Amino acid sequence: MEGWVVAIFVPTVLFFLIVAPTWIFMHYRSKQKLASAMSDQERADLEELMVQAERMVERISTLEAILDAETPDWRRRLDHA
C-alpha cells in the first residue's frame, strides 16, 4: 500500500510545485500580450495619423520655402525673439 501512495503523491506534488505555477504564469502572460496588442481599429487610426503627419511635414516644408523666398532672414528673427 505504501508504494501506491508514493506513486500518486510524488507526481501530484511535482505537478503542484512545477507544472501548475508555470501553467498559470504562461496563461496570464498570454492574456497580457493579447490585451496589449493593438486592435484593427487602433492600427487603422495609427496609419491615418502617420499619413496626416507626413502631409504636415510637406506643408511645413512648403511654408518654410515660401518664407525663405519672401523673407530670407525670418529664421534669424525667430532665434532672437
Image (spheres, rainbow, N blue to C red):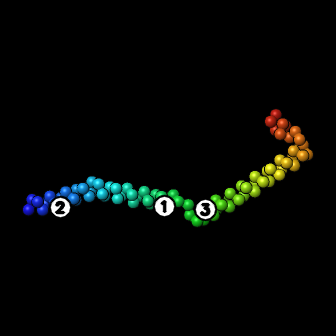
CA distance separating discs 1 and 2: 37 Å
Instruction: Point out the residue furthest to the top here.
Output: 80
Residue tagged 1: 34
Name the residue furthest bottom: 40
Q: Quadrant of residue 42?
A: bottom right
* Res. 8 mark: 2
Q: Residue at x 44, y 60 (%)?
A: 31
Q: Are marks 2 and 3 in contact (CB under 8 Å)?
A: no
Mark positioned earlier in the residue sequence (1 or 2): 2
Residue 4 image position (x, y, % from top left):
12, 62
Q: Whole-Å distance between the Cαs marked 1 and 3?
A: 14 Å
Looking at numbered disc 1 in the image, what kind of residue is underneath it? Leu
Discs 1/2, front: 2
Q: Is residue 46 left or right of residue 15?
A: right
Element at label 2:
helix
- Name the spot of residue 51 as percent of width and height, x first: 71, 59
Which percent across, then down, holds residue 39? 56, 63
Based on the displayed image, in which of its 4 quarters is residue 59 positioned? bottom right
- Cβ atoms under marks 1 and 3 closer than 8 Å: no
Q: Would you name the residue on which mark 3 appears?
A: 43
Residue 38, placed above or below residue 62: below
Which amino acid, mark 2? Ile
